[in-house]
Image (spheres, coloured by chain):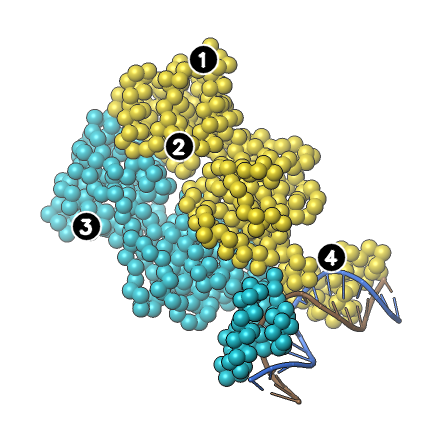
Chain colours: A cyan, B yellow, C blue, D brown
Amino acid sequence: MTTMKEIAEKTGVSVSTVSLVLNKRDVGRVKPDIAQRVRQTATDLGYKPNPLARSLRTSKTRILGFISEEVATTPYAGGIILGAQDAASTYGYMLITVSTDGQASEESEIAALKRYGVDGFFYSKMSNRIATVPKSLSDYPVVLVDATDANNTLPSVEPDEFQIAYDATSRLIEAGCERIAYVGCSENMIAQDGRLAGYRAALEGTDHGFDASLVCNVLNNGPALRAVDALFNTYNPDGFFCFNDARAWYVYECAARRGLTVGKDLSVVGVDNHRVFAETLEPQLTTVELPHYEMGYWAACKLISMIEGKPVDTTKWPRTTSPLPPLDAPIPAKIHCALIEKGSVAR
Amino acid sequence: MTTMKEIAEKTGVSVSTVSLVLNKRDVGRVKPDIAQRVRQTATDLGYKPNPLARSLRTSKTRILGFISEEVATTPYAGGIILGAQDAASTYGYMLITVSTDGQASEESEIAALKRYGVDGFFYSKMSNRIATVPKSLSDYPVVLVDATDANNTLPSVEPDEFQIAYDATSRLIEAGCERIAYVGCSENMIAQDGRLAGYRAALEGTDHGFDASLVCNVLNNGPALRAVDALFNTYNPDGFFCFNDARAWYVYECAARRGLTVGKDLSVVGVDNHRVFAETLEPQLTTVELPHYEMGYWAACKLISMIEGKPVDTTKWPRTTSPLPPLDAPIPAKIHCALIEKGSVAR
DNA sequence: TTGAAAGCGCTAACAC
DNA sequence: GTGTTAGCGCTTTCAA
């Protein structure tokens, strides 16, 4: 690890000059040729600044703290954190992730993160829930990810549940399905509300109309399977929009029992929460992939722009199949991610 | 953030005395009552050491670097990282996780981690593969997680694939299954080799014997479904050990088409890679949950013990249903995690 | 236009 | 036993 001191000695100048040059504060302060020589030796020696030493003076560490709930970390977190990391890395930041058990450990993890001097926080709930950000974060930049601020005052990045359901249902309509069912979630959550609304809106715009009998909100296991089975018996749907892969599983099983083949006799569009669709069944159904990666990426861009007090370079945003905001758009307080589509509706 | 200087002033001693006391180096150096007063003001003021400033002198940051491959981050990584974080947190460490695209970005991520002064590295492949640790890590403590060192010289934590399959198959035997099939993975990977061997060994220990015709290694989609279908047609198995949830899905669909119910007419034991089993189908089948959390936890314990040059307090290890090493055992170079079982074999 | 010097919070020789 | 001093790598007045 080469230091500024070494560069100073090798170039025959002082450390302060080196600091000035390497921090691009040399215009009109350091003679151009000196500056050039400093830059040269810096690259020769492969100089990289020591962010920790720097932070001692500036109290800016270029470290971001990512707070997530333990309980939900497994299936969804990966993509979000990955996206946040990629963005952070692009802008020269690092991510320290901590997970809390929801209550007790949260404050101590926050305290630890503060001790490490993080510049800002992500606060994540891993499945779009209303969240109250602890007051201990109130004098730091904070961005919510996959969560909505209870006070509606902090910026957040969330999936656009309505649009996801609207688009998915529209695909089934376009595919010519006559009786389109929604296998939803009987737990009370934002995603369920938004998706039901999107499903309904898509159908009401056509001569299908919305029929509450085709909505089947289930939880899991035997009861869920029997509910879907009953739906088949009574209304024999030929199109299904499924809340997630677990629920799609029941549709598959019911169809198979009737000798029906998904992708031929009926169409299924499902949200791939667990990445089983993508790895296994894509040709048979349309996968709606939640834009976890993009959510993390955009959240990081937003957080960094708040920390640095200037807009980030959006040309560095990731390529994706989902609609990106226009390049020159300011980063809005709330970002809604629409769906990413793979595969195609069969039939 | 109170500093040592403040404590020193408030107590009327020098900073070095404070440092001595607060680092527990005061025995026989600082008068007990002075030491006591220092400790008192420290707690009064809610003092927490600044790990970054400390690291400037000691070049120990209590930060651990977790390197994982981007491609595989989503389904498996969460639990491992969570476990590593919990262990790190217990011992006062923090985790910085970075993900690489396998090649190009790896060295730059490692360089960044070094700049932040990490004390050691996790090197993870997220599905037990042979890995060559880059030489840039060679003078740091390194522990492999869900990966095996190509040179067989570094410590690693891996799932015990053989035991997983052996135990799973044994459950099916105990449940009275007559024709036990293995729906495996046709890709070449360590898990597949170990599991096939375990399945075989379990059967060879009984009068069932091993029958290669009951092994069905598949990839995915239509071909996979048809292969499983053919297996049903030819051998009509009544017990299935499935490589993962994706493969179990095919068994479910084939069974349903025949009017058979899993958990009644046939038994399925599957490895829950995507956490769909646990959330959806547990009563119907036996879930083999890979011990991701434990792997992360143990890897962190091992890494920290290498960094600190002393055995860690294993009484702080997490409770789990899987067999834990005895509390007073030294941490071995290689740790094999056996399976965690949930649900029960139906029938 | 450049450099000397102080200091961020902490540790560790070395005096006293 | 305790305090003084120096210094980790860097930024930032302030003089020259």
Q: Nearer the viewer, residue A254 or A135?
A: A254
Which numbered tag is attached to residue B23?
A: 4
Q: Secondary structure at mark 4?
A: loop
Q: Which label lies toward us, 3 or 2?
A: 2
Q: Which label lies toward us, 3 or 4?
A: 4
Mark 2 / mark 1, whichever is N-terminal: 2
Asked whether, in this view, residue B21 is left or right of residue A97, the answer is right
> Mark 2: which amino acid?
Glu
> Mark 1: which amino acid?
Gly
The residue located at (21%, 26%) in the rendering is A258
* Residue bearing mark 2: B187
Q: Chain of mark 2?
A: B
Disc 4 from disc 1: Cα separation:
63 Å
Q: Position of residue B119 (x, y in %)?
A: 62, 52
* Residue bearing mark 3: A202
Disc 2 from disc 1: Cα separation:
25 Å
Q: Secondary structure at mark 3?
A: helix
Q: Residues within 10 Å of mark 2 (few under 14, many from 20)?
A: few
Q: Are marks 3 and 2 on the same chain?
A: no
Q: Which label lies toward us, 3 or 1?
A: 1
> Mark 4: which amino acid?
Asn
Q: Nearer the viewer, residue A134 or B129?
A: B129
Q: Can you say whether A85 is above or below D5 in the image? A: above
Q: Are marks 4 and 1 on the same chain?
A: yes
Q: Secondary structure at mark 2?
A: loop
Q: Chain of mark 4?
A: B
Q: Can you say whether B20 is above or below B95 in the image? A: below
Which residue is farthest left? A207
* Residue bearing mark 1: B209
Q: Chain of mark 1?
A: B
Q: Can you say whether A69 is above or below B262 in the image? A: below
